[in-house]
Amino acid sequence: MTRTSDTSFNDTPATPYAFVDLDTVERNIGKMARKLADHQLSHRPHIKTHKTLRLASMQLAAGAVGITVAKLAEAETFAELGIDDILIAFAIVGERNLERLERLHNRIRVSVTVDSWEAAQGLSAVGVRSGKPIRVLIELDGGLHRGGRQPGQDIVDFAVQLRELPGIQIEGIMAYFGLIYRSGNPDAIAADVQNESETIGRVVADLRQAGIAVNTVSSGSTPTAKLCEYAAGVTEVRAGNYIFNDVSAVQMGLAEEADCALRVAATVVSMPLPGMATIDAGTKALTSDRAHHGDGFGIVVGRPDITVAALNEEHGMLRFDPGKVKLSIGDRIEIIPNHSCVIPNLNDYIYGVRGGDVTERIKVDARGRNY
Amino acid sequence: MTRTSDTSFNDTPATPYAFVDLDTVERNIGKMARKLADHQLSHRPHIKTHKTLRLASMQLAAGAVGITVAKLAEAETFAELGIDDILIAFAIVGERNLERLERLHNRIRVSVTVDSWEAAQGLSAVGVRSGKPIRVLIELDGGLHRGGRQPGQDIVDFAVQLRELPGIQIEGIMAYFGLIYRSGNPDAIAADVQNESETIGRVVADLRQAGIAVNTVSSGSTPTAKLCEYAAGVTEVRAGNYIFNDVSAVQMGLAEEADCALRVAATVVSMPLPGMATIDAGTKALTSDRAHHGDGFGIVVGRPDITVAALNEEHGMLRFDPGKVKLSIGDRIEIIPNHSCVIPNLNDYIYGVRGGDVTERIKVDARGRNY
């Protein structure tokens, strides 16, 4: 595989910059790999979180069976970099995109999700054209209503129709139960995972009764994967966020601050009034994403008495009790972002850190490849 | 100047992609240039909005006296591309950044804002080292409390202290009255502009009384510039958003939909339930930014009966009345973003459109240069 990280750069990054603690990343990957292996679950991590070959390679080395991507451009990037087993968990629509899929299909092992007759006909044409069937996972709506067939007769009817199309090989189903992020603690999440498991169990039974082979059942987010002892019937999870964790994961009780590998370094540049300080990181470094179940725009590491109260594009506004907190212009702080999955996409490079020192510069290979 | 746009690309962009209607951009630039000239106001547009030489060149050709940037990396990029008069409207803090500033200062006409003694001492050292003083604008806190000295004695005392530092040439003041975006209609905004004008008038009078020369009074956002008939005492505005406009501008009554030059093209990829459709543009194309005074995540052009109800990273969720709206998988829609200033930063290229056809590919020269 191409190497897309370098340790030869000789420049300290200027703030704001995003960095990952590589020891924490390794610990997060190892812990997840062991847990999923213990439960006989395959892992196909979603790489939208990091978009880098460097970290995908670590996930594959730890036992991941392949990767998941959302967009064709991510698949194209990672195929180019040597990854040869990719699930595109997104509907492929339009002739232009079908041509792109065909090129990938002729080159690597690619699977795609499908949830509409319109998209299915396109995939069928590609499968016929290329002389080998396209592997598809039928998308099941996990309750978020952003895509997928409905549990019950709807998904069965669709599968039966789909089976008749030439050029398509049904591998199984794919679901995303994204509502799990609305649950604020491990007990509620465990109940969500059980519900996910039961819904999937019924759907798979219905499909099998209709004569549809279901070899792969791909489901699960990071919360599902972290509580996979409550999952049954799933064969593969796509957890992605776990590699970094973030404020949402902390607020949901799924991670400690020390498990949060991705951080943004920033510098205090102004202190206009007592109890107020401004840093050089705004939405272009941290995004406007809010945390599930949390206020503010990130956790200031080691400074629980400082809040990131607001962000403009290039400014972050800190608030604190001036009687208790000492802060000066020029101070460097580190912020755990609300939502780590959107940070690498903002950067050409993120920096790898060990023991507090920047040791490598990691190219964000698929930055901006969201089409 | 280097050319950073090309008309020779021969590929239709895959959705989602951001594009600008160049006729609308020209109209927006021309209208603003005429209005500011009528009121004897210089224009130094903030290029954080578009981050491209292509559009900055159009603004300069229309009479802009130079550009404003927020970050050193933006200044470095545009200096490299041939722009030689740049205001960095951001505090420069830390030795590393002072060295970067010195290189720029030795090469082009650069001005910087300052609001702290710590930063002032650094600037002074650079001015002394380089043998020519650094031009500074003292930042006045316009009420947002993200930086700046307070009106009254605070800014006067700071200016008097600053004047004693070697290597510094005080040009005047810089203010940003960002609270103006909290006002929801032109009447309220006009009152804000009058308030901005009065505050600035008092500060400038105080400074002059203390013997501080104030040649440049840089203030004003796009709303201020659009209602500059209510401004007095300001010599230069930094309006940036006006070149594109966005949902906030529409909601504030400062622009019509037809004045919104920047749009994101997206494709309907799934229709999981009646009244629901999913597009391939999520926060990585549109950001999570909310509009001032508006709901949803963008305006669907020509489809007022469709709302962009929610965004995930790569999915946008449309909601509509299925009895009234016809929408199909594969349909292409165009979205006016809530906040146009954050969109080019997500893309390597934005596309130039005339009469509905993509005619050029514009490099986002300073994409990601937020440090």
Image: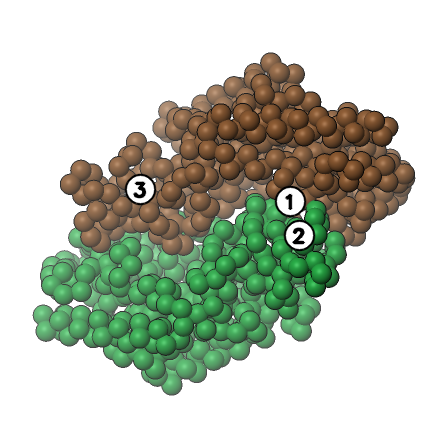
Chain colours: A green, B brown
Q: Are marks 1 and 3 in contact (CB under 8 Å)?
A: no
| Amino acid type of the residue tagged 1 in the rendering | His
Q: Is residue B52 left or right of residue A12?
A: left
The circle on residue A276 is 2
Q: On the same chain: label 1 and label 2?
A: no
Question: Considering only vertical position in the picture, is B323 above or below A45?
Answer: above
Of labels 1 and 3, the one closer to you: 1
Direction from residue A358 to residue A51 in the image, left or right? left
Viewer-nearest residue: A174 or B290: B290
Gap in angstroms between the C-alphas marked 1 and 2:
8 Å
| Residue nearest the observer in this picture, B359 or B60 | B60
Residue that badge 1 annotates: B145
Numbered mark located on residue A250 in the image:
none
Residue ID for mark 3: B307
Relative to B251, is A126 above or below? below
Q: Are the residues flagged by discs 1 and 3 from a single subunit?
A: yes
Q: What is the number of callouts on the image?
A: 3
Q: Position of residue A29 (x, y in %)?
A: 48, 75
In which quadrant is the N terminus of chain B drawn?
A: top right
Q: Which of label 3 and label 2 is nearer to you?
A: 2
Give the SS element for disc 1.
Answer: loop
Mark 2 Cα within 10 Å, few/some/many (few <14, many 20+)?
A: many
- Residue B55 screen position, x and y as percent: 55, 30
The chain carrying label 1 is B
Q: CA distance from mark 3 to mark 2?
A: 37 Å
